Amino acid sequence: MTHRERLLTAINHQEPDRVPICAWYTPEAERRMLRHLGVTSGATETYKAAGGPLPLLMDHDFLISWMGPCTGYYSSSEEEYTDEWGIGWKWFQNPSGAYTEMVRHPFADLKDPENAPLPDFSLPGRYEGVRSLIRDYGREYGIMGGVACTLFELSWYLRGLTQVLIDIRSDQDFYDVYLSRLMRWIEVAGRNLVEAGVDIVWIGDDFGMQNRMIIAPELFRKFFKPRYAALFAEWKRINPEVKIAFHSDGNIYPIIPDLIEIGLDILNPVQPKSMDPARVKRDFGGHLTLWGTVDIQEVLPFGTPEDVRNEVRLRMRTAGKGGGLILAPAHNIQAEVPTANILAFYDAARCDGRYPVAE
């Protein structure tokens, strides 16, 4: 099978030759893997429009072109910088690496959402990266447009989380108009990605904490479900074959049926310390492909290579049968993850990810 055939077979709930695989990295972890492979390229893939060499070198089954709010992460080497949305970022060090965190929210004092300035996603140049991926690799690999941090996250990136949680409870008319204003970027970006020919559009908003949701399910249904439904319907009108993936960390079990109802195809990352992948597969595997499932909180950073292999075997055995699984770590591989464990993930996915699944 080509990588693209393998991916689409799994998404269509059939068993390919082996499970499709991918991983995404923080820039530090990505550079370390490239050095391990003897590659000196500085073209990292993390949150970039055209990607870098690592997904090809590690034999991923699809390539991601990133755009939108998520590209503000790691977008400058300056200690403090401002992205195109006006969000202020700063680098912070920790014992294992460095991260960027938001330090300024440009809409903190916004009074009229209709006056909120947004970047222009109608510019053709924004889509050169994804068009080049499709042109150069689209016959062999699946191509995904990554437009995560789509609405809920963008709303608080721009305004501050505390203020948005106040808005969503105490000033709902304002928040409704505000979200409608923010919808304009993803309406334009999503349409352009589908028309360019991506196989998958990947949106996402973190609604989950470790063991519960950040907002009540009824608030998700009031503010976000109708908006996602409109996006999904429009993209599938343009191309009925396009697949839609949704990312949320944490436990979002109460709203999975809502996402299925409006046409979701793929759920990411099925964080195993928050939602049991075997249960998600049992309850929703007839409708959803699970993408992720490999523990990034404990097993990958702190386990042994054999622990990683056992994790892969467990996910194949409990979530891989019948297809409907894309195997990946349940978030970015961090700088603290040993190279041996990263290699063990790939080796186990290729060796133990074969179909039919061994008992």
Image (cartoon, helix red, strand yellow):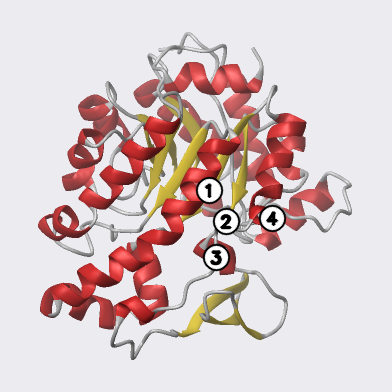
Residue 120: mark: 3
**Contact between labelled residues 4 and 2, with CB atoms less than 8 Å apart:** no
| Relative vertical location of residue 310 with respect to residue 205 in this rendering, above or below | above
In this rendering, which labeled residue sits more in front, label 4 or label 1?
4
**Contact between labelled residues 2 and 1, with CB atoms less than 8 Å apart:** yes
Q: What's the residue at 50%, 32% (across, down)? A: 327
Q: What's the residue at 47%, 53% (across, down)? A: 188
Image quadrant containing the C terminus: top left
- The residue tagged with tag 4: helix, strand or loop? helix
Residue 146: mark: 1
Residue 67: mark: 2
Apparent side of residue 259 relative to residue 351 in the rendered image (left or right): left
**Contact between labelled residues 1 and 4, with CB atoms less than 8 Å apart:** no
Residue 166: mark: none
How far is mark 2 from mark 4, CA to CA? 12 Å
Residue labelled with disc 4: 125
Q: Position of residue 242 (x, y in %)?
A: 46, 29
| Relative vertical location of residue 165 with respect to residue 126 in this rendering, above or below | below
Q: What's the residue at 18%, 72% (across, down)? A: 168
Quadrant of the rendered image containing residue 73? bottom right
How far is mark 1 from mark 2, CA to CA? 6 Å
Label 2 sits on what residue type?
A: Met
Label 4 sits on what residue type?
A: Gly
